[in-house]
Amino acid sequence: MIQNVGNHLRKGLASVFPSRQSRKSASRTDFKDRAMANDEGYRNPTEVQMSQLVLPCHTNQRGELSIGQLLKWIDTTACLSAERHAGCPCVTASMDDIYFEHTISIGQVVNIKAKVNRAFNSSMEVGIQVSSEDLCSEKRWNVCKALATFVAHRELSKVKLKQITPRTEEEKTEHSVAAERRRMRLVYADTIKDLLANYVIQDDLESRDCSYMVPAEKTRVESVELVLPPHANHQGNTFGGQIMAWMENVATIAASRLCRAHPTLKAIEMFHFRGPSQVGDRLVLKAIVNNAFKHSMEVGVCVEAYRQEAETHRRHINSAFMTFVVLDADDQPQRLPWIRPQPGDGERRYREASARRKIRLDRKYIVSCKQTEVPLSVPWDPSNQVYLSYNNVSSLKMLVAKDNWVLSSELNQVLLYTLEDDKYLSFHMEMLVHVDAAHAFLLLSDLRRRPEWDKHYQSVELVHQVDEDDAIYYVISSALGNDPKPQDFVILASRRKPCDNGDPYVIALRSVTLPTHPETPKYRRGETLCSGFCLWREGDQMTKVSYYNQATSGFLTYVTTNVAGLSSEFYNTFKACEKFLLDNRNDLAPSLQTL
């Protein structure tokens, strides 16, 4: 049914208002053509590109580009992009998780592109794309994507960065989602701590083959580096990329001591710089294999700095966890020895590595997958809640940022837009309401009140108040079409206040599964992949209310009927929402304020 979305929509729209639609389509085509002409040769003003030929001095034991060298190039390119926007020196604050998809051989070219996705007060997110090319065969590969946070620094004045104005759909999407990613970074340490505390780790030490074990202490590495002028930037601070390269070096040595082979780095968990180091500092780098799984191992690395040999106190500069594999001649991962942890801290690191592995897999699966590859209803549990919430909000923001919405109908200043994209048909309704945006946000974010204006919601039960911004609801909805059974939903509702002026209030909805609410014969389980509200402040006591829904197969017939048949169903529901907001615009009950 999903594959026929375009046919349903085109036939329905053409049969009802062919002349009007053709005029809109032609007008939109002309507009897009003009826009493309105007943007021909457009380049983001913060974009910086670097191309490097991989020489023997850049490679590791396998004849491949050293990841440490690549990290230095990535950091340099990103820093230049940040400074181009800031107009002043910038320092690396963090580097998000990186997954390496392809190795780079000697003689190949590395192409790095960096641009500022969004600027906040004094920090900015820089997006980096790395690819490689073979000059002889002209083949190209994607190597990795990275997101770095840089902080602008002036010694004599406080930095207030100018805002980014996105132009393309890609820039608008990255700009919008950057606020949600920043939110995750700010709570990153607490999130990992909470997840480790809540995750029950299976202790399989007793069941492992002890004859194939390596004591963790045999993998321990400690190395010291003296920060010299070539290692520092124009401010005298150590390059973040240089520190990351040193960390990769000691981690590789630790991994090699376990596998007695040349390991390949596949992933790096977030680098977070806790403080600067300067020329003349001694950096002590420590690494150890925390745990080895069947085909991968986690190596923990930390960096401490001190100035003089007599100093007893060392400053903690950075920590990271790196995942290595050992590849055979066919580039397939080999089986690794088990690790025997030392009692005490060694066992703690061993168990935490198991927890991080589960968290890492959940995060990569939920955050990194394409929208159409994620199952509609993903299991909710404390170990993936933060990333489900992130995916929930960012998916809605990405849908909003699409630039090919088509106006399908307009009635009494209620606008209905549609969007055909990939395998989905999405619709978007919009109206202006004389109510304060913050009040509308409070009223609409409590799903328990939705039956007051939406007749399709028969009942709503708050199942779990996860935190201040996220809640899980159990919804019973009326039957659609000829289906005799009513529907039920388990919905994660995530709400966000604006990050900056001009940002909307966001209420994002998506389906999850809970063991306490399985499917039952009484209801037909419904699912929503991406839906919710965006509320823009349009002046004093005026709000633009927009509702978005990415239609799944079970909802498709209902959507196409409403769009193509110009049914009043959508319109009446949205007007009922307006009346609900107006009638309750002074209602600031404590229950709403404490959601």
Image (cartoon, rainbow, N blue to C red):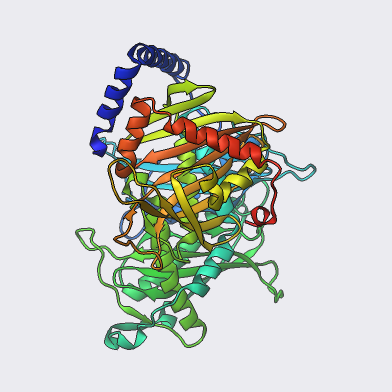
Q: Position of residue 34 (x, y in %)?
A: 44, 13
| Observer able to see residue 220 | no
Q: Residue at x 35, y 64 (%)?
A: 518
Quarter holding residue 531 = top left
Q: Quadrant of the C terminus?
A: bottom right
Q: Position of residue 45 (x, y in %)?
A: 55, 29
Q: Nearer the viewer, residue 547 or 248?
A: 547
Q: Is residue 474 above or below residue 46?
A: below
Q: Nearer the viewer, residue 565 or 365?
A: 565
Q: Residue furthest front?
A: 484
Q: Is residue 552 above or below residue 169?
A: below
Q: Residue furthest right?
A: 156
Horizontal side of 312 relative to 483 (left or right) equals right
Q: Nearer the viewer, residue 35 or 506?
A: 506
Quarter holding residue 535 = top right
Q: Position of residue 536 (x, y in %)?
A: 61, 34
Q: Residue at x 29, y 42 (%)?
A: 553
Horizontal side of 131 relative to 185 (left or right) equals left
Q: Position of residue 449 (x, y in %)?
A: 56, 49
Q: Is residue 332 above or below residue 576?
A: below
Q: Nearer the viewer, residue 58 or 390?
A: 390
Q: Quadrant of the N terminus?
A: top left
| Observer able to see residue 568 | yes
Horizontal side of 150 relative to 260 (left or right) equals right
